[in-house]
Image: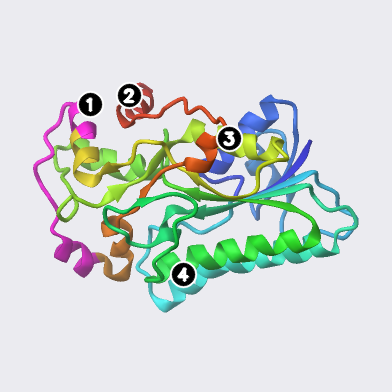
Amino acid sequence: MHVFITGGTGFIGRALCQSLLAQGHTLTVLSRRPDAQVQAICGQVGVVRALAELTPTHRFDAVVNLAGEPIFGPPWTEKRKTILWDSRVTLTERLVAWIAQAETKPKVLVSGSAVGYYGDQGDQILDEASPPVEKGFGQRLCAAWEAAASAAEEHGVRVCRLRTGLVLGRDGGLLARMLPIFKLGLGGRLGGGRQWMSWIHLSDHVRITQTLLGDDRLSGPFNACAPEPVTNAEFTQVLARLIKRPACLPVPALAIRLALGEMGELLLSSQRVYPKRLQEAGFAFQFPTLEAALKEVLAA
């Protein structure tokens, strides 16, 4: 299978590239980096520097759309929001525009999203059928991102939308930011710690994407998160225990909001999300519990 991947040099993308290459697939990655640098990150892949380079004669069996500037980074100024929007929504719209013109359509588009799609819903149990709470930039961004991808269905393409939780893995993602603080003994819960964190191990995320690529029966939204969401307080306790450090320095919600502004919603909002549709499809998680996932990551 020839797969076109956006976001292939990112934390999730590079793991997916390496796994697909190991299975014998052919990959082309969208990246502005030099070819040699992309191949050093992703493996032996072809490189396209801009979507404008794609012509109607380009042919891919599948497309995986993971592109997006890091959501947690510089403050969410209006300029930053535009960058985040363009790197997700506008890019996806352009990708679908190419699909519309392609002489041979890809059979499937697996497109990124996040559990932030649901908005801040407290203790409410959420699955793929749960309606979102329309509030905040993060929620609007995810909803527009999914709508842009869904437009490919009008061209006969099977579309799967990945609502990803916090991804746990080596050398990137959530733990890359948390571990240095926790190893110094300066970790603690965020706010009251009652907000739910839906998470997933990186290897399970890769396996989910591969499952969606290969199973023609699957389409629509899928919660790419483990079947054991935890509260922020629980996450903090498990991580601190495994690295044998105290975690007794909570960060007040007010301090988070003052320091991060609107971006603070990423740390304080609550999504208690379950992967109902994946489980119904028979997907088996290698790391269904937080302790098992963190032990594997920390063992490196």
SS for callout 4: helix
Residue where numbered disc 2 is placed: 295
Classify mark 3: residues with Cα within 10 Å, few (<14), some (14-19) or many (20+).
Answer: few
| Amino acid type at image mark 1 | Leu
Residue at (41% x, 58% y) in the render: 116
Q: Quadrant of the N terminus?
A: top right
Residue at (64% x, 60% y) in the render: 149
Disc 2 to disc 1: CB gap under 8 Å: yes
Between discs 2 and 4, the one toward the N terminus? 4
Tell me where residue 103 sits by quadrant.
Answer: bottom right
SS for callout 3: loop
Residue 164, x across and y down, in percent: 47, 48
Q: Residue furthest bottom?
A: 78
- The residues tagged by marks 3 and 4 sit, at their Cα atoms, a distance apart of 28 Å
Residue where numbered disc 3 is placed: 281
Classify mark 4: residues with Cα within 10 Å, few (<14), some (14-19) or many (20+).
Answer: some
Residue 21's place in the image compared with 66, above or below, is above
Residue where numbered disc 1 is placed: 242
Tell me where residue 167 sits by quadrant.
Answer: top left
